[in-house]
Every structure is written in structure tokens, then in C-alpha cells.
Image (spheres, coloured by chain):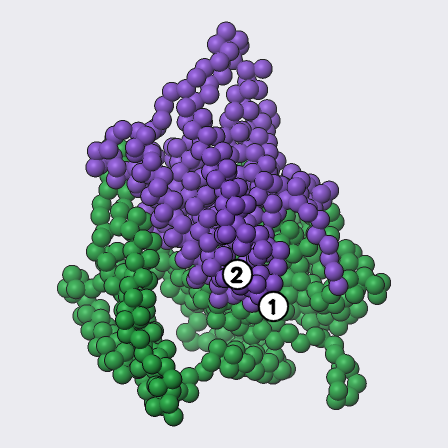
Chain colours: A purple, B green
Amino acid sequence: MGYFLQQLINGLTLGMIYGLIAIGYTMVYGIIGMINFAHGEIFMIGAFIAFITFVVLGLVGIGWVPLALLIVLLATMLLTSVYGWALERVAYRPLRHSPRLAALITAIGMSIFLQNYVQLLQGARVKPLQPVITGGMRFLEGGEFAVTFSFLQMLIIFVTLGLMAGFTLIIHRTALGRAQRACQQDLGMASLVGIDVDRTIALTFVLGATLASVAGLMFLLNYGVIDFYIGFLAGIKAFTAAVLGGIGSVPGAMLGGLLIGLIEAFWSAYFSVEYKDVAVFAILILVLIFRPTGLLGRPDVEKV
Amino acid sequence: MREAAARALAFDLAGALKDAGLVAGIVVLLTIALVGFRTQDASGGAALSYRFEDVFAVAALAFLGRLAVALLRAHRPRPVLGASVLFALALTALLLHGAETRLLPFASAPFNWTIAIAAWTLSARAAWLLWHSASELSAEARDALMDRIGARVQRSAGFLGPLLLVAAVTLPFLPWADRRLLDIATLVLTYILLGWGLNIVVGLAGLLDLGYVAFYAVGAYSYALLALYFDLGFWTCLPLAGILAAFAGILLGFPVLRLRGDYLAIVTLGFGEIIRIILLNWYEFTRGPDGLSGIPRPTFFGLPITRTPPEDGHSFHSFFGLEYSPIDRVIFLYYLALALALITNFVTLRIRKLPVGRAWEALREDEIACRSLGVHPRNTKLTAFALGAMFGGFGGSFFATRQGFVSPESFTFLESAIILAIVVLGGMGSQIGVVLAAILLIGLPEVFRELNQYRMLAFGMAMVAIMVWRPRGLLAHRDPTVRLSDHGPPR
């Protein structure tokens, strides 16, 4: 029981991180119908910027953890969102009216570029970070397995839920959200009624990059080590989450992220750690075969 | 004419300066963290070193470049020409002189050379504009021009193909063909083979496959395992590897081929990763990350190409009474790769004219129409998938025999991405395009092997640049294999 509960907590934390990345995939796919392949690298860049900010703060001497975290969070969100914007501007906007495969190739090209860019600038070795937030609450101390719910995990879940709430508000209550939903339904029509489509798409990339950067920060805090290659696997898993939840649907992305996190945690705990990624991909394949629209997706009717 | 153009494009200096400043600001935001600071491992935590001068240099160059582009757009080539020629001359002179590194914008030579080349390109653009006034090619005109070139190359495939073939066959006997060149050529041929194989799936059948490397891996490991466990030779294993890879293709394709577009892409990607993870973790069978070594080399009709002949027979050179030379094996592998690639090409070209090949192309264009005409989509796609996988398997077993060693490291997603990039950059469905793209993407970086660190950086950038410049591929020219033409009966 205790072991199960511990895995549940670990899986939820992991799922929150995947969910945040998955939102970026699902939004971009919803609007321009394209896999933003470089989104995983944006997440990786977020983690690196967070790491560098931590080191800089450590040298400057800001040691009070809440303040340091706030500064890191803001700096990471700001600087990474610029990457999201630049990515869209360089690799996607020129191809807006081209075959979809072309945009996929530029996305893969950007992904290769960004990985090597970070490797060149920051080195190929893993970057370790001292634990920033320590301690936690312990349950079931008397049982055969004591459960730890660390403050870090609480923070991750809390921040993610907060971001989700804020994000849902943006989508449903603001002019930008309305423009996004309009673009999702019909790009051409949206531009006819006076929506600046280019700006909406750019802002979608910025929002997605912001969320991914927070995920990067949390990944850094949670695992304590990062390297230039983390974006690939996290990106694929987050995309799996987006597909699982039904691509194009924001609550679906979050749900899919949670499920992927839970599957990964439980599979590692009860079966084998080596094959946890195989489990995730196998589930992706199964979902697509039996329910191609995902859990919360709308059926996609093909018209002649 | 020029006056009219100039009047129409009144130049807004303040606006251009503001715009360039904005670009420079964005560049600063992009680079301040990742370029400005470098984290280094130190005892008891991370240490930092600073590179703010690089941030400043990038931002300043971005500012100047943006301003120059704005001036060119407004047909003011004179100041751009003067400034960029001066800048390019100064930079090139400094670089060639090879001293006084303080004056150069960056610490590393490749970046400086890139900047110098960019400056020369800018001056060439400005000079062009100065002499041809407003006759700059518009994007559409440029695209149409490239389309015409693509069409002409396709049409002249009749004599271009044999020409290339002759060049390929005589390559090992050319005076400057040393071992290094042949190795690169063999590598390029391997990618051409893989590109042609994937072209069946992506270019002809229109199925986006991001996990092609899985079949490459199946082929390589099939040969390696069969040779090591059952002591089979290359020529027995080659067809077996192809068949096994085709089976893997059918196994994957059967459930997933009803998915469309991006879903199929991501499932194939997942499949590629699954294969790699299994190879990595099934230690008893595949020896995991250690890889399999001691894979036998191919023989020439049973004659091994080695220095010492086997005890009960001849080796290649002793049988023909030749002097042994270590380059023999390199040349042999080169011809083997050429033969495999040519077989792939031949099969593809012939099968395009069979009903199944036509059904592929029809499916690519319109699946619903095909279904109403009685083409079974899944089975038809499966044939394409299996055939593409088979050539992937051939490529894999050639890779295994050439290296003598396989490990899961060689079969990462990057490999799939490179092969797909070759197909798409070349112009989907174009056989000659694949050759061109493989030479560009594989041959060029190999030649510049010394710039190892910057190679993949440039590779990624080149993929983006080529696609932005030619979104449908370099030699894109999508002519159906059959068409009802106005000028006579269908060919």
C-alpha cells in the first residue's frame, strides 16, 4: 500500500511535467496542424537557462530559496519564450503555405540545431545541481514502506495546477484565447474576420515555450541533472501524452500527461526500469489503433 | 526606372534603425544566458565563465545585418556595398593573416569564416542590385526558375543517369581516388540506397515514416546475429536480412497503416525507439550497448579479400594472381554499395510502372478516390512499407559487414531524420534528387570532418535553410508516372 502510494505521488509529479510540455504540442497542432518537433528542445533550453540562472544567483549570493526560485522562474519563462518566438519566426512562418512535410523537416532541423547549439556552448557533460528544496512530509511511518511526499513534489503539483488554471483563463476569457480558438477552427476564416493570424500563432508558440520552460525548471529541480539530450525523449513522451489525450484538446494534454507519468512510474516500479519507454510507446500505438482520436479528442471526419 | 522604384520605396531610416535595434535586442535576449555564461564543473559545485563579448558581437552583427537587408529592400545598395565590402575585406584579411585575435568578432575560426562569407554574400547582393537596378528576382520567379530546372533535370534523366553511372563506376580508378574519398563515396552510396528505399514509402506512397532506422537496424542485427550464431556468410544473409526487415515492416504496418499523416509519423518513430531500446537492453542476445563485433566481411564469389589466403583455398588476389593491396577491400565494398543501390533504383523504377506502383501514387494523391475504385488502401500501403523496409534491411546488412561491428548507438532517431531529410530535400519522389541531397548532406559534412563540433550545427541549419528556400525539395517536380496528355496517348 505504501509503495503503491509512493509511486502514485512520483507518477503524478512526473505527469505534471509531461502535461506542461504536452500543452505546447497540442496547441500548435490544434492551430496549424503540425507537430512542433523542436518543442522538446525548447523544454531543454528552459532547463539550461534555469540551471544557469541558479548558478548565477548562487554566485551573486541570493540564498533565500523562495526569492531565488521566483527569480529563476521569471528569468526562465522570459528568456525561453523568446526562443519559442524565434523558432516560429525562423522555421515555421516562412513555410505557412508549404506542404506540411516541409515544416516537419525544418522542425527536425531546428531540433538538431538547438541540441548542438547547447552542446557547443555549454559542453556535453551532464550538469548537476545541488538540491534546492529539501525535506518533505512522511506518511505511514509504521507500515512496511514509509511514503515521502517531498516539498518539491508539492511545489511542482501546486505550480502546475496554478499554471493550468491561469492558462485555461487565458484560453476562455481573453481576446488572445478567443483568437486562438478561432484559428483552431478555421485559419482562413479567422483572418477574414480581422484576426491577426501570424500574431496569434506567434503568441501560441510563446505561450507553449513558457509552459515548457517551467517544465524544464521542474525537471531540473526534480532530477538534479540535465544534459543537452533530455529534450528528445521528454518531447516524444509529451507528444505521446498529447495524442493520448486527444490532440488539439488542452485538458486532454494534461490528462494524457498524467497518464503517461503514472504509467511510467508504475511500470518502473512493478516491472522493469529498462523497458519503461517501450511501455509508453506501446501504449501510444495501442491508443492510436483502438481510439485514434485520443481520450478527449473530437472525431476527425475526412471529407472529399 | 530606378528613380521610380526609389520614389516608390521611400526609405524610412528611423523605422529601419528601430527595427534593427529590436532584432539586436531579441538576439541579446536569446544569447545572454546560453552564450553569455558558460557553466563548468568545479569541485563543490558549478563555476561560471563569461563570454559577454560574444553576445555583444552577435547582437552588433545582427543589427548591422538587419539594417543592410532593410537598405537593400528599399533599393539603397550603395552604402551597403561599401560597408560590407570593407568589412568583408578586413575580416578576410585578418583571418588569412591569422593573428590579432582581439580584433575578430569571435574566438573560433569557423564562426568568423561564416561571418566573412555572409558579408561577401551581402556585398554580392548589393552589387547585383546596383547593376541590375530593380530586376531582382521575386520569390515566385525564383521558385518557378528552380521548378523549371527541376523539370529539366527530371526529363534529362535518360542521359544524366547513365552519365552518373559511368562516373560512379570509374571513380575508384581515377588518379585522385584515395582511400578516404572511396570511404566517403561508399557512405554516400549507403545513404543513397537508404534514401531510395525510403523514397518508396514517403515519396511514392506518401506515408510519413520517422522510424526507418528500425528496419536498418533489423537488417544489420539480422546479419550480425545470423553470422555469429549460425556461421552464415554475407551472401546468404543478405536476402534473409531483407526478408526479416520486410517482415518487421509488415508487423508494424499491419496495425498502424490505417492511421494518417502525423499519427503514422509518431507511431513509426515510437517503433524505431522500441527496437533500439530492445537492442540496448536484451543483453544475453544482442550484447546490449557493447555491440556485436567480429562480423565477417563479404567474399567475392567465395574468395575472401584478405592478405593471407585461407589454408584450403585462394583469396581474391592469389586466385587472380595479383599483388595484394589493402585498398582492394575498400574498392570491393564501394562496388557492393553501388550494386545494392542500383538494384534498389532499378526495382523502384520498374515497380512504378506496375499496377501496384500506380496504386501507391494514386493513394498518395487521394485515398478516398482510390477506395471507391477498388484499391485496398491497407494492403497497398503494406506492400510499399514492406518493400521500403526490405531495402532498409539490405542497407543495414551492408552497414554491418562494412563496419564489422554493430551497436544500438548507430540506430538513433537522428539517423531516421537524416534519411528522411535526404528524401524530402531532394524533392519527394525524385530519384536524382535523392542522389543530390545525399551528396550535399552526407558527402559535404564528411569532407569537413575536422570541423566536427560545428558539423551538426551547420547540418541542422542547412536543413532549415534549404526547406525555407525550396519548400518542395531541391528538384521537386511531381509528374505522375502516367498521365493522360493532350498530345497523344498516355505514355
Give me the chain letter of mark 1.
B
- Residue B112 appears in which quarter of the rendering? bottom left
Q: Quadrant of residue B398?
A: bottom right
In the image, B1 versus B302, the foreground residue is: B1
Mark 2: amino acid = Ile
Instruction: Give how far across and how far down residue B194 sits, in percent.
Output: 59, 61
Name the residue: 74% across, 79% down: B483
Residue located 50% across and 38% down the image: A164
Viewer-proximal residue among A49 and B244: A49
Spatial distance from mark 2 to mark 1, Cα to Cα?
A: 34 Å
Residue B129: image location, x then y, percent: 35, 84
Residue marked by disc 2: A195
Q: Quadrant of residue B300?
A: bottom right
Q: Is residue B246 left or right of residue B324?
A: right
Instruction: Judge whether B218 appears above or below B344 on screen.
Output: above
| Residue pointed to by mark 1 | B428
Residue A38 in sight here: no
**Residue at 58% in and 61% down:** A190
